[in-house]
Amino acid sequence: MNRSQSERLYEEALQHIVGGVNSPSRSFKAVGGGAPVFMKKAEGAYFWDVDDNKYVDYLAAYGPIITGHAHPHITKAIQEAAANGTLYGTPTELEIRLAVMLKEAIPSMDKVRFVNSGTEAVMTTIRVARAYTKRNKIIKFAGCYHGHSDLVLVAAGSGPSTLGIPDSAGIPTSIAHEVITVPFNDATALKEALDKWGDDVAAVMVEPIVGNFGMVMPKPGFLEELCRLARQYGALVIYDEVITAFRFHYGSAQTYAGLSNHEAIRPDLTALGKIIGGGLPIGAYGGSKEIMEQVAPLGPAYQAGTMAGNPASISAGIACLEVLQGAGVYDEMDRLAVKLTDGLSESARRLGVPLTINRIRGSFSTHFCDHPITNYDEAQDTDGEAFAAFFRAMLRRGVNLAPSKYEAWFLTTAHTDADINFTLEAAEASFKEITR
Ligand code: PLP
């Protein structure tokens, strides 16, 4: 496969754009370096790069593109919105329509506020929780990613009784000291942390189904215990559903049938993004009326945005959710994901490649190891070089995956049986190549 134009553009991009990319996860640093592929067109389940190579896409732009690229219903909605003006700085009726759709699908959200990204949504839920509880600290779980705001870019300490250290330069230690990180799926560690810091914990924040160190389900009872403990210590529960909302069914993880006991796992605040913008920039957060009334102009917690609720993003979001309301769309993504993961497992087993697959409906993660993945330590303890070699072998055969061993594969409503068959053939050849 010739990718000389991508290589040329990467050299040029390096002169002007830091690292040549506008988000570090787009670089190929985690898969051996070199030029990332520069795409020029996307439609349905496919990408075309600047050298005219075609790829089947499972990146789905890190999650938002659940209806496939350039879905006609969404494209039309964006065109109509643009023709009516892209930004007003006033309220619009469209915002109400999308807010109602979100509330109907996620009943814990009594009141909603739109922002421009998942990062903003999460950042603001923390502020609101602090304003409401008049406490400072938050507890998060190792390996859960919540965007790039200061408070959540904090790594695990050496245990639940250790305060966080910053994960990035430029974050004051004093801020990191407001964050406590505990292992996912470990209610005992959470209890220890709350025993020690509980009086000052404003919120326990979690990806209720993890999407950022692979796809990882909470163990049975874990979310129930998390919510019970948080409440016992007077802390709020924040669910970061930026990846999970509308990913597995028309609703979010907190209403997903794979998790029972929905009342017992109901959060106080929820952060959203990705799918709800249909591929345009968006974020949203919401919760009970009482808690959300902390937010300006009603309450003392300030949050604002020039671009927030812009008609193009909101229209794209409404159109995307309309597509997802179609009969059988989630079942079809599920069916294709089962076929794909069964085939990958079978191929890997036959060729002696250790592979653990975590699948939740139409999304899954592939871990080059022979142990289960239930927390971040286990996800780290996998063969990154084997993943990198597999990633490159698949790319050369026209299959586009996320360039990181921690990221998921996403099925979309545009994938077909033919795409799955093509991908399985590429995987068979790639497994052979990496074991040679
Ligand atoms: N929360 C989760 C769970 C995410 O996966 C991400 C991004 O990947 C974010 C928050 C941040 O969202 P954004 O990149 O839109 O700021």
Image (spheres, rainbow, N blue to C red):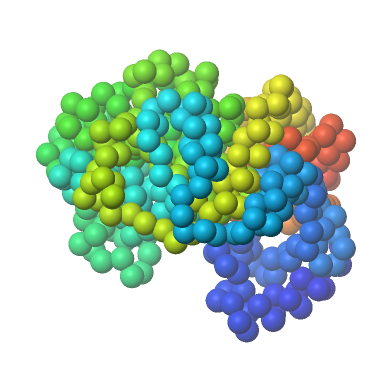
Location of residue 173 with respect to 274 vertically, above or below: below
| Residue drawn 49% across the image and 39% down it | 96
Location of residue 13 with respect to 67 vertically, above or below: below
Q: Is residue 218 visible?
A: yes
- In the picture, measured across the screen, residue 247 lies left or right of residue 106, that is right
Which picture quadrant has residue 111? top left
| Residue drawn 43% across the image and 25% down it | 107
Most extreme residue toward the top is 261
The image shows residue 114 at horizontal and vertical percentages of 45, 47
- In the picture, measured across the screen, residue 84 lies left or right of residue 430, that is left
Residue nearest the viewer, comparing 49 with 30? 49
The image shows residue 20 at horizontal and vertical percentages of 62, 74
Which picture quadrant has residue 287? top left
Location of residue 408 with respect to 389 vertically, above or below: above
Q: How many marks?
A: 0
- In the picture, measured across the screen, residue 268 lies left or right of residue 373, that is left
| Residue drawn 46% across the image and 50% down it | 91
Most extreme residue toward the bottom is 15
Residue nearest the viewer, comparing 416 with 64? 64
Q: Is residue 371 visible?
A: no
The image shows residue 403 at horizontal and vertical percentages of 64, 55
| Residue drawn 51% across the image and 27% down it | 105
Residue nearest the viewer, comparing 271 with 322? 322
The image shows residue 336 at horizontal and vertical percentages of 75, 29
Q: Quadrant of the N terminus?
A: bottom right
Residue nearest the viewer, comparing 300 with 285? 300
Most extreme residue toward the left is 199
